Image: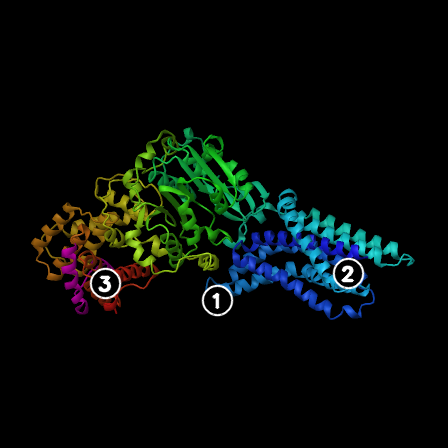
Amino acid sequence: MRSLLLGAAFGTAVASFAYEIAWIRMLSLVLGSATHSFELMLSAFILGLGLGALWVSQRIDRWPDPLRALGLIQCAMGALAVATLPLYLGSFRLIGTLIGVFAKTSEGYAGFTVARYGICLAIMLPATFCAGTTLPLITRILYRNGANEAAIGDVYATNTAGSIVGVQLAGLVLLPVIGLKMLVVAGGAIDVAIGLVLLYVAVPRDEAWRTQWLATFLAASIVIFLAASSLRFDRSLLSSGVYRFGGLPARGDFVTTFYKDGRTATVTVRLSREGSLILSSNGKPDASVDSAWLAPNSARAKRRSLLDDVSTQVLLPLLAIAHAPGARTAAVIGQGSGMTSHFLLGSPTLRQLATIEIEPEMINASKAFRIVNHRVFTDARSHFAIDDARSYFAGAGHRFDVIVSEPSNPWVSGVAGLFTTEFYARIKTYLAPGGVFAQWMHLYEMNDDLVLTMLAALQENFPAYIVYLTDDSDIVIIATTAASVPDPDWRVTEWPMMAEDLGNVSGLTPSSLAALELADANALSPLVATVRANSDFAPVLDLRAEKARYLTGEATGFEQLNGSAFDIVDALSGHPMSLATDTAVLAAVPRLHIRAWSARLRLFPKDTTPADSAYVAIAKRRRVFDGAIFGNVAPPDWRRWVSLVFAVDRDVHGGSPGSVDKALYARINDFLSRANPPLSVRQSVDFLNAADAWDFATVQRLGDELIRKTGSREVWLPHDYLRDATVVAHLKNADPRGAKAAFDALLPLVSRDTVTQLRTSLLRAHIARARLSRDGPRHIQ
């Protein structure tokens, strides 16, 4: 009897952990794989165990035959676990409904979290409740049979051993081989088998109904397991990412070309109706390539801009290698579509590239993208490392000239650990002297505060860095162990393999690539230094990113940081940009669109390129402007005239900080000399001209004069623009007190939207640092 019961304790632990691993992976496809989702799952599992133990503890002494009860409970546990499979499939539609019911607010997120917990309980509680009764029953039976207190240790030791075996067997062996559904069925079969054996022993042989009763139990179990095994797990449903998109794809929207339950994630590749390939991990798209890129090079006749995921997958490696054109060794964290490693291997100087991927099935799935990643599979310089990034680098035995980190989103459990100060401290030691580190980060489903925590972690270890936009909602940070980030060599696009791959990309010029720069450490460090860094010990990203995802926010302050009327980051860093000449757009980056419109406007009205809706409005405004300054007559409303000049000035000079179109201002000044404008008009125009040219002495003088007039309603320039330019002028002229006075005077008048908030915080941080540097801490109040 003792051996039988210890065997039951061992076997039920194996089954329970098969359930737990299967449920967690299954629910990750419904609820997402964030840390908070795992917390809900684990809580539901443990709650079931606790409630089961509490329930049986109040009844166990009243049961005449606890061994028979244990056998019945084991059978019930297996049957209930398998019976949850239809309920699980129904949870996909339920979660989609719940996402629509709860508002995208903090209160809605709290309600949605409670609802998700209800789903976890519905699936996990019945079987785990039964599991919670087993060990108390086994211990009680042993006591009744004369065992002493040592029996408790034996039972729990055996159960612990079963748990260890269950984790290894289920997670590393069974799951990749038989899949999620059959793993639950296998766990249920183990529990039912244990229950039938216990009942066979418990029921006396002389009872006439014994054989019939056991046969009925066995037949019922077979029927349940056959029904469960025949249940169809629709792969399009499982890979839908309903927890993120809030809906299920319609029939025919996607064709699943690859599906595998790997050791760490369920990996899928789907072909969309439009011909795009999408690679997903636990239902979350990690990479996609549109149909145009999937065509052979010879078939890509039309030049086109970089769009969506392809934009980052191309520009990330391009930016990294441009800052280290002589790199001989490189490592990439995360395979994804494989395009990053593929483009790095376009370097003729590279001798070795390691692609580090923790999930082997991700590599197998990426073979579907061979048309755009073939070098990572065929080039002798390339090899894969199936490992965690931290452990790989610790055992690599050498340093790298380039390391590119392109993991999944930081709200995915475990991934946020690749955005911490501790990780960056380690990465720094694995870089060769002067080596380059490239970090991808998304701005969608995020907010500015969370992005700052990641930058703070990076800045603690890499004081020199540059932030680039690779599309409208993705950034790449290029950092280095050197004193400053090396200047990029954009001639890397002319390397033979690179040129072949990029031959059909429009707008691929040095000026467009340089315009991808968003900000550098000189501009950002005063603000970033005030933020608590994301850390293994203060995992802000891990804890808050899932909520940011649910709220579907955007880090709009970063997205528009250099898209404001006055570009404070380039002015503070002292990085002027020449007037735009590229009319083609490289990528969906706001500044590149602005520069393309500006280049076309400077050709106006001779430009014959087909116009988009935004440029139509710009061209119309230019026609009105040209008419307004044609004659000698003063306009009927000077305020409206100044507003028109401001808008045209931004149309011409947007995306070109520190540069001025002298011909434009020659025409404006010629008109003003004939029209005898009020003083405020002349001051406004001169302020605009000086701000464009970064004539900070003039900007400071005129800005202070205009600020003093704000109460008299004689200031006709936007307050945000006046504030930004005047404060920066004082800072560039080493006058932090004047900067603070201008900042404080206009603070009540500037915008309060999320785009402006980051600029406001950045200016405040620069003022504080400048005052600290000049006056010392004792004089700062």
| First of labels 2, 1 by sequence position | 2
Tell me which amino acid carries mark 1.
Answer: Glu
Q: Nearer the viewer, mark 2 or mark 3?
A: 3
* Viewer-side residue, 174 vs 113: 174
Q: Find the distance from the CA under tag 3 to the CA under tag 1.
A: 41 Å
Q: Quadrant of residue 149?
A: bottom right
Return the residue at label 2. 70
Q: Nearer the viewer, mark 2 or mark 1?
A: 2
Q: Residues within 10 Å of mark 1 (few under 14, many from 20)?
A: few
Instruction: Identify the magenta region.
Output: 696-725
Q: Which mark is residue 771?
A: 3
How many discs mark residues in the rendered view?
3
Position of 62 with respect to 124 (left or right) is right
Query: Mark 2–mark 1 contact, CB under 8 Å?
Result: no
741 versus 447 height, above or below: below
Question: Percent x, y for residue 712?
Answer: 17, 69
| First of labels 2, 3 by sequence position | 2
* Viewer-side residue, 554 vs 773: 773
Question: Percent x, y for residue 709?
Answer: 16, 67
